[in-house]
Image: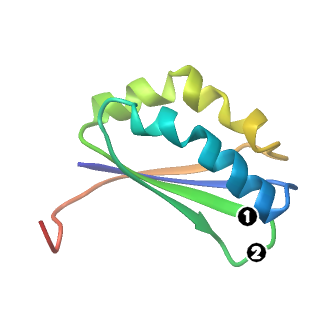
């Protein structure tokens, strides 16, 4: 499994950002290979993130090349490019 952590900076109020994220939820649920996505709020104002769990690097690569991924900056009115980090999951605590 592959973990992708994305951090985005947005001027949107938290309520509006949450509304837009919920609106896009069905698109993420339908994306092949995405096992889970966590929506997170970081300590710094205006800084949010997504923690994605993928079944494979191929699925992650397909996502990164997709219209869904490319639509994120506009959807959240990002003020700078996102920070992304990809990690291999060694093992999980619970099944």
**Residue at screen point 60% across, 58% down:** 49
Residue 11 higher or lower than 77, as above or below: below
Helix, strand or loop status at disc 2: loop
Q: Nearer the viewer, residue 94 or 3?
A: 94
Q: Position of residue 50 (x, y in %)?
A: 54, 55
Q: Is residue 82 visible?
A: no
In the rendered view, does 64 fall on the left or right side of 53? right
SS label for mark 1: strand
Q: Is residue 10 shown left or right of residue 25?
A: right
The answer to whether mark 1 and mark 2 are in CB contact below 8 A is yes
Q: Residue furthest left?
A: 95
Residue 14, percent across and down?
77, 64
Q: Residue at x 63, y 41 (%)?
A: 23
Residue 30 lies, with reference to residue 88, above or below; the image says: above
Q: Residue at x 14, y 72 (%)?
A: 94
In this rendering, the answer to whether 70 lies above or below 75 is: above
- What residue sits right under mark 1 in the picture? 47
What colour scheme was applied to this rendering of the protein? Answer: rainbow
Q: Nearer the viewer, residue 22 or 78?
A: 22
Quadrant of the rendered image containing residue 95:
bottom left
Residue position for label 2: 44
Q: Which mark is residue 37?
A: none
Structural distance between the alpha carbons of marks 1 and 2: 6 Å
């Amino acid at each position: 499994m592959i973990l992708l952590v994305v951090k985005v900076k947005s001027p949107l109020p938290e309520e509006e950002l949450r509304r837009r994220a919920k609106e896009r939820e069905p698109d993420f649920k339908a994306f092949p290979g995405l096992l889970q996505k966590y929506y997170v709020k970081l300590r710094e104002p205006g800084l949010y993130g997504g923690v994605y769990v993928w079944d494979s690097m191929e699925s992650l690569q397909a996502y990164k090349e997709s219209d869904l991924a490319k639509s994120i900056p506009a959807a959240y009115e990002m003020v700078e490019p996102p920070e992304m980090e990809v990690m291999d999951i060694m093992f999980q605590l619970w099944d």
